[in-house]
Image (cartoon, coloured by chain):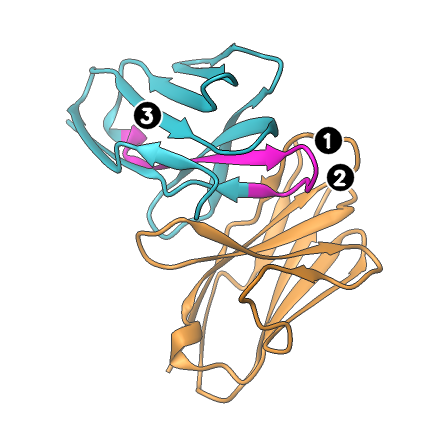
Chain colours: A cyan, B orange
């Protein structure tokens, strides 16, 4: 099964609202990353949070990490129609060095 | 910032033929490259990990004779889908990292359609 599991699987909101996506994982990690993917395109790296960090900000993005609960959340504030995309979390394990992706959350922001 | 170029961005081929996809790190040395496969509306599944100059490590269930990976230099890895069949149609994405880094840079992906 996937290391990361996002919820919700799909999220539809109005422009200007905030969007929150969650990611849970199973094993110990070195870091967790969030990516964005527009339909049919490659992945764009949004933010990386290390296992010893609890919160990180980048523009309208806020990521939290709770290693005790093995979960992370991505908050997009003041959403825009252009934020419509799929969002994936990926965990890098402490041993293997490879990233494992969750199933993703499809975000639709209505203008 | 780090850039990974993946080529071609899309390809259509006939059943039975082979297709090569290239992944290049343009401004950094990629000690490790990863190849992923993505089906429509699904997540990315790691296929294999390749380290420069050594054999690729394939994930369970991935046929190494079908998906040939070569990482001959620190800036280039290739994935060759041999004797392609329609079920191999998918979106293939590479990513690269360098020693000591925490993040990965992804290519823009290749849409393979086998007819």
Give SS at disc 2: loop
Say which quarter of the image contains residue A6: top left
On the image, numbered disc 1 is attached to which residue?
B101
Marks 1 & 2, CB-CB < 8 Å contact = yes
Q: Secondary structure at mark 1?
A: loop
Magenta span of residues: A82-99
Residue B52 lies within the magenta run:
no
Q: Relative to the observer, which residue lies in front, A26 or A22?
A: A26
Residue A87 on the magenta span: yes
**Is B80 located above or below residue A72 in the figure?**
below
Q: Residue A33, position in %: x, y?
A: 52, 29
- Quadrant of the rendered structure where residue A14 is? top left
Q: Residue at x 47, y 24 (%)?
A: A70
The quadrant in which residue B50 appears is: bottom right
* Residue at mark 3 to residue at mark 1: CA–CA distance: 26 Å
Q: What residue is shown with label 3?
A: A21
Query: The residue tagged with tag 3: helix, strand or loop?
Result: strand
Q: Residue B96: x, y in percent? A: 66, 45
């Amino acid at each position: 099964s996937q290391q990361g599991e996002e919820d919700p699987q799909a999220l539809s909101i109005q422009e200007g609202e905030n969007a929150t996506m969650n990611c849970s994982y199973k094993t110990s990690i070195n870091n967790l990353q969030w990516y964005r993917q527009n339909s049919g395109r490659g992945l764009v790296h949004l933010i990386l949070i290390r296992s010893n960090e609890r919160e990180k900000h980048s523009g309208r993005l806020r990521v939290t990490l709770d290693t005790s609960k093995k979960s992370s959340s991505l908050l997009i504030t003041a959403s825009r129609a252009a934020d419509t995309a799929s969002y994936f979390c990926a965990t890098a394990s402490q041993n293997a060095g490879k990233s494992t992706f969750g199933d993703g959350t499809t975000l639709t922001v209505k203008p | 910032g780090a850039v990974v170029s993946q080529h071609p961005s899309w390809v259509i081929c006939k059943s039975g033929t082979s297709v090569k996809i290239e992944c290049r790190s343009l401004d950094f040395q990629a000690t490790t490259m990863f190849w992923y496969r993505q089906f429509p509306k699904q997540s990315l599944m790691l296929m294999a990990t390749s380290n420069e100059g050594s054999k690729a490590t394939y994930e369970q269930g991935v046929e190494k004779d079908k998906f040939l990976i070569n990482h001959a230099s620190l800036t280039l890895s290739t994935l060759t889908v041999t004797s392609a069949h329609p079920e191999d149609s998918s979106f293939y994405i590479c990513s690269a990292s360098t020693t000591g880094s925490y993040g990965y840079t992804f290519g823009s992906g290749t849409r393979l359609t086998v007819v």
